[in-house]
Amino acid sequence: MKNKAILFLMAIMLFPLTSMAQDIFSKYSENPDVTYVSIKPKMFQMLAKMDINSDDPEAQEYINMVNSITSFKVITTDNKAISADVSKWVQSRKSSLEELMEVKDDGVNMTFYVKQGRDEDHVSEFLMFVDGLSAITKDANINMNGEKREFETVVVSLTGDIDLNQISKLTQKMNIQGSEHLDKKGKK
């Protein structure tokens, strides 16, 4: 009986940690100070069924990558308190993730994390955390819903059976700063 009581107490003590680690996106999904994006698996299935020339090897690689994604979520905010909470959440996740790369430029910090997948070229989770964006967005003319916006923090979570080689190609095509380093896959 004593062992069951101890296990119960441990479960209660660990519950906030597990809910915090899994819940940052749903926590802020309805917050007006946050831009929230969540693409569901059905959308990826629809994208994969688009009329793409399947004889083209590059198009086929794209289809394969899209089919392997199970979740894509983004939070963007300029709210300092939310930014601090997101940063705390990322810090709490660090022990289960491997830092892939870090880019620091003009006050902006961008860090890429991965969770190992089935082999060294695949990951089950890809997490990008960008902080300090207000240094470059404060004077930018960014309007959303008719309001001028600044951004401080962005967190992107991508889960599935993700091929890092494909992510590198995709981010380079999208001209995402720092993407040229992804093809190194964290090799030192």
Image (cartoon, rainbow, N blue to C red):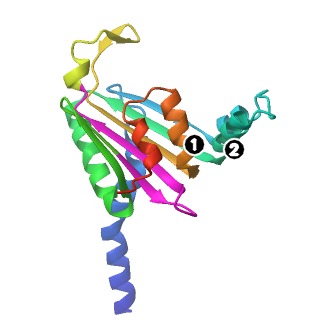
Seen at 37% across and 81% down, the residue is 7
- 132 falls in the magenta region: yes
Q: Nearer the viewer, residue 36 or 141?
A: 141
Q: Which residue is mark 2?
A: 64
Seen at 42% across and 29% down, the residue is 176
Q: How many marks?
A: 2
Identify the image quadrant of the C terminus.
Answer: bottom left
* Magenta-colored segment: predominant secondary structure: strand
Q: Residues within 10 Å of mark 2 (few under 14, many from 20)?
A: some
Q: Contact, CB < 8 Å: mark 2 with mark 1?
A: yes
Residue 100: x percent and y percent?
Answer: 37, 52
- 56 falls in the magenta region: no
Residue 75: x percent and y percent?
Answer: 39, 34
Mark 2 is on which residue type? Asn
Q: Nearer the viewer, residue 81 or 96?
A: 96
Q: Nearer the viewer, residue 13 or 157?
A: 157
Q: Can residue 42 be spotted in the picture?
A: no
Q: Which residue is mark 1?
A: 166
Residue 159: x percent and y percent?
Answer: 53, 49
Q: Residues within 10 Å of mark 1 (few under 14, many from 20)?
A: many
Mark 1 is on which residue type? Gln
Quarter of the figure with residue 133: top left
Numbered circle sitting on residue 28: none
In the image, residue 21 above or below residue 39: below
Residue 91: x percent and y percent?
Answer: 27, 53
Report how far apart the C-alphas of labels 2 and 1 lie in the structure.
9 Å
What's the magenta region? Answer: 112-133
Q: Secondary structure at mark 2?
A: helix
Image side of residue 133 versus residue 185, left or right: left
